[in-house]
Amino acid sequence: MMTTTDRGDGDRKDGFRLELAPLIADAAAFDGWTDAAVTVAAQSAGVDADAARFAFGGKAMAMIAAWTRAIDAQMAQALPRERLAALPIRERIRVLLEFRIDAMTGREESLRRALIEMAKPGHVAAAARLGWKSADVMWRLAGDTATDYNHYTKRATLGSIYAATLAVLADDRSEGHADTRAFLGRRIDGVMRFEKFKAQLLQPKGEHFSLTRLFGRLRYPAR
């Protein structure tokens, strides 16, 4: 059983990782997600390199996870729910995703290497959990309170948009990442159209469109 001291040590270790993560991301462009990048980051931060390497255990996914969670934390601090509340839901999501694009600007090579690591067979499940968690943070900041199946479909949908956007960002050389932002805008527009269509399908009987009535008419045409 974990003691209070154990939890405190765990929290300190976690905080240590989050503090080093952006510096490791800087170094990963040259050294990959390796102990070499951790050493460079530790030297930049003025902390013990052995302790830093121990904190990540030489695991690339531990480094990438810390970077992802550091961006989650920065996003939550910069864009609290009350700041986004006046915006339409589409704009809340766009602003949150564009914050993440900006947070990775200048680290595109590190992102590209991170995507390669996450695509490895042994890392896919952990990568999916990272994407889900970031999507959950974004929806909560956007004010989502759904607890039914919408809770899961919203996060799955946003997670897929985020993953696709990162893939575009990693190779985007356009000024100000204009291509990535345009891609993101198109994906969000597509999802919003789908959500509108889905809402129409789920409306009570007698309102606008009924999928059941449509199928009934197809099966039993009027005579």
Image (tube, helix red, strand yellow):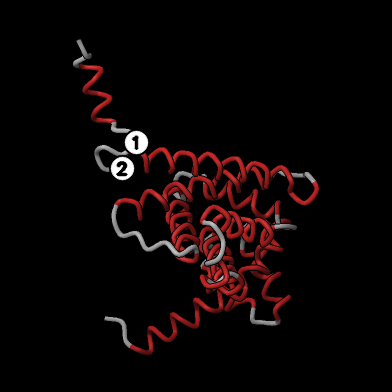
Q: Position of residue 193 (x, y in %)?
A: 49, 39
Residue corresponding to mark 1 = 208
- Towards the viewer: 127 or 104: 104
On-image quarter of the C terminus: top left
Q: Residue most toward the top?
A: 223
Of the two numbered discs 1 and 2 in the rendering, the one whose residue sits closer to the viewer: 1
- Towards the viewer: 162 or 23: 162
Q: Secondary structure at mark 1?
A: loop
On-image quarter of the N terminus: bottom left
Give the residue type that dot 1 points to: His
| Residue 20, quarter of picture | bottom right
Q: Residues within 10 Å of mark 1 (few under 14, many from 20)?
A: few
Q: Position of residue 181 (x, y in %)?
A: 67, 47
Q: Check the image and report above or below for 10 versus 94.
A: below
In the rendered structure, the answer to whether residue 197 lies left or right of residue 181 reads: left
Q: Position of residue 101 (x, y in %)?
A: 65, 56
Q: CA distance from mark 1 to mark 2?
A: 8 Å
Residue at 43% in and 80% down: 10
